[in-house]
Amino acid sequence: MLAPSSDLTLSLSQAVREAAYEAGALALPFFRGGAQTSARLWFKGGHSPVTEADIALDTFLKGRLTNLLPEAGWLSEETTDDPARLERRFVWIVDPIDGTRAFASGHPDWSISIALVAEGRPLLGVVHAPIHDRLYEAQAGSGAACNGQRLSVGDAKHPDPLRVAGPQPLIDRLSRQIGPIEHLPKVPSLALRLARVAEGAIDVGLVSKDSHDWDIAAADLILQEAGAVLTDFEGASPVYNKAQPRHGEMVAVASRLHPRAIGAMRA
């Protein structure tokens, strides 16, 4: 575990929280619950949707966060990658709208994800779900909270069957090994799916391959500080700000359930 939060993260936390709230307010005029977004929509790489709201939030957050910590590098889903980030001690890792398909179709489960990373691990993380009016946050070594209420799943009793959310093939793989589960609807925003593990609404959050740093970095810290973990099926934690910011299959789960979960996924 990283050392307790530094004066730096303590000084930044309020400003990052405010930036997340402001970004949410910027996105809301484009969102139409249960209907197609009013934002212009196009596809990058032939299949990945992006809207003018994604770009607007990315521009806003890059300006705001860079001003807060000018020496930090930048990695975002909607910004062309600059390899100079690899030489920086600190890096902002941001997904301005995690769950763009959900946002564009009027589904409420999208979020704004902001992490500050140092030496491969997050120091500060915020996941804001504007439609649900929930803001999850953590600082390394100082605990996690949602809307100011402390999160802790380390000692919580878990229901039987376990509540599981994620891609269907991984859920099938898990259930073959541990028996009956409660199959929850997949949460389109991966950051929000993981944050819900941290608050105890999901017992096991499964992650398919090819997630990126911006999908998981902030929620990873929130999980850790709430008494849960995010690892691959061999038990290794993700490392951030590498040349290729992509990850394989993973599981998010309370620490005491972790051996059982990864054992099932490896079987």
Image (cartoon, rainbow, N blue to C red):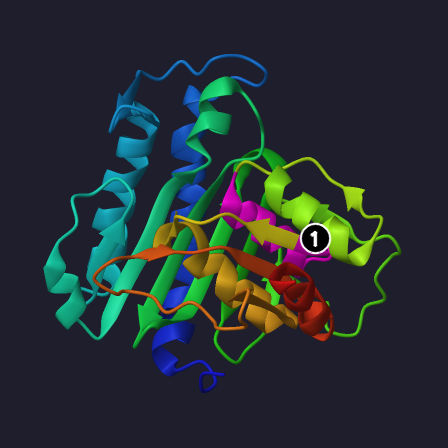
- Furthest toward the bottom, the residue is 3
Left or right: 221, with 263 as reference point = left
Q: Residue 223: percent from the left, percent from the top?
A: 58, 65
Report the residue at 29% width, 22% height from top: 43
Residues rendered magenta in the picture: 189-204
The answer to whether any part of residue 152 appears in the image is no
The answer to whether any part of residue 34 appears in the image is yes
**Disc 1 element:** helix
Is 26 or 210 nearer to us in this picture? 210
Q: Amino acid at mark 1?
A: Leu
252 above or below 38? below
Report the residue at 52% width, 80% height from top: 141
Label 1 sits on residue: 174
Asked if residue 132 is among those painted magenta in the image, a careful observer would answer no
Left or right: 69, with 25 as reference point = left
Q: Residue 51: percent from the left, percent from the top?
A: 32, 24
Q: Residue 82: percent from the left, percent from the top?
A: 12, 54
Report the residue at 27% width, 23% height from top: 46
100 above or below 171? above
Q: Residue 175: percent from the left, percent from the top?
A: 75, 50
